[in-house]
Amino acid sequence: MSAPTVTVAGEAAADPLTHGIEKLVHELSVLPLKGEHLGIAESYSPSHFTLTNYTFWMVVALALTVLFFVVASRKPKLVPSGIYNLAEAGVAFVRDNLCAEVMGPEGRKYFPFIGTVFFFVLFNNLLGNIPPALPGTGTLGTTFMWGLIVFTVYNGIGIKKNGLGRYIKSFIPSGTPLWLAPFIFVLELISHFLRPITLGIRLYANMYAGHIMLGVFAIFMAIAIEHVSATSFVVLPLSFLMQVILRGFELFVAVLQAYIFAILTAVYINGALHASEH
């Protein structure tokens, strides 16, 4: 019985496409960052904590975010230019277009939290487009945890502003028939508890899927170069073109997903603030 198994495994290993996809999935999985990965020593894994490849790049993205704003704020000018201009434009966009526009004037006081969400996701997404970096937002652990943070914050704001009783009562819209109220309450409750899950999955799926597509066309290019044939002269340029197009598209998705995550956060906070008006 062992002979057929060896033959199948040998055939799978001999197939360049299968081997390439297996390697791609392995590289995009969460791996402990040990000596074979970027030369990081195993001493970075004390106790039960293990530094993974995604965690490493998330820390790098966080450091770059802090460095960006520290450098941009060192010598503010009356007429901004360069990195200061870029930072001011980003801050103004989040403060005015996300916070104030969604929540009104009172939304500006929630800028620190929403701004942190936006720039954390943005820098992680953008860094993930620079090989060999991986996006810190490319794992469910990170994105789901941010979803839980947003869930906790907006519910805390709603309870503080309206009181626990009125906040829970807001799950049943005014004018709902008494016989229908329990059913609506359960649906609203489920909807609220699904929010951190949908927030996390949406961001994770978009970032992970993009890297899968880039990896697949990179595999096609590698196969065309390693196994030269007549089709290589068609596959290679088309795969390279798709790489260029997808890279540009991934940059757009990186910014778009940061915007979507931040604006949904603002919408949830706004809903919690005005829960008693529902």
Image (cartoon, rainbow, N blue to C red):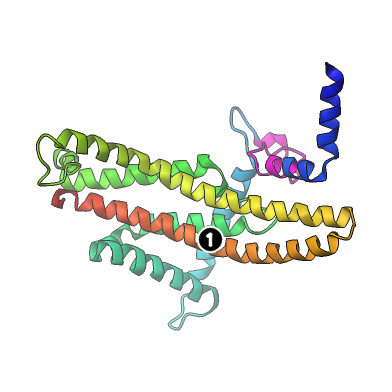
Q: Which residues are magenta?
A: 23-44
Residue beneath the point at 24% across and 66% down: 105
Circle 1 SS class: helix
Residue depicted at x 80% and y 64%:
234
For residue 270, say whether it is visible.
Answer: yes
Q: Is residue 116 visible?
A: no
Any magenta on residue 41? yes
Residue 164 location in percent, x, y?
Answer: 18, 39
Report the residue at 24% width, 62% height from top.
106
Give amino acid for label 1. Val
Query: Which one is nearer the viewer's eye here, 250 or 18?
Result: 18
Q: Nearer the viewer, residue 22 or 157?
A: 22
User: Residue 243 or 151: which is nearer the viewer?
Assistant: 243
According to the image, label 1 marks what residue? 253
Q: Is residue 267 above or below residue 185?
A: below
Whole-percent x, y for residue 50 in the image? 62, 34
Return the residue found at the far top: 1
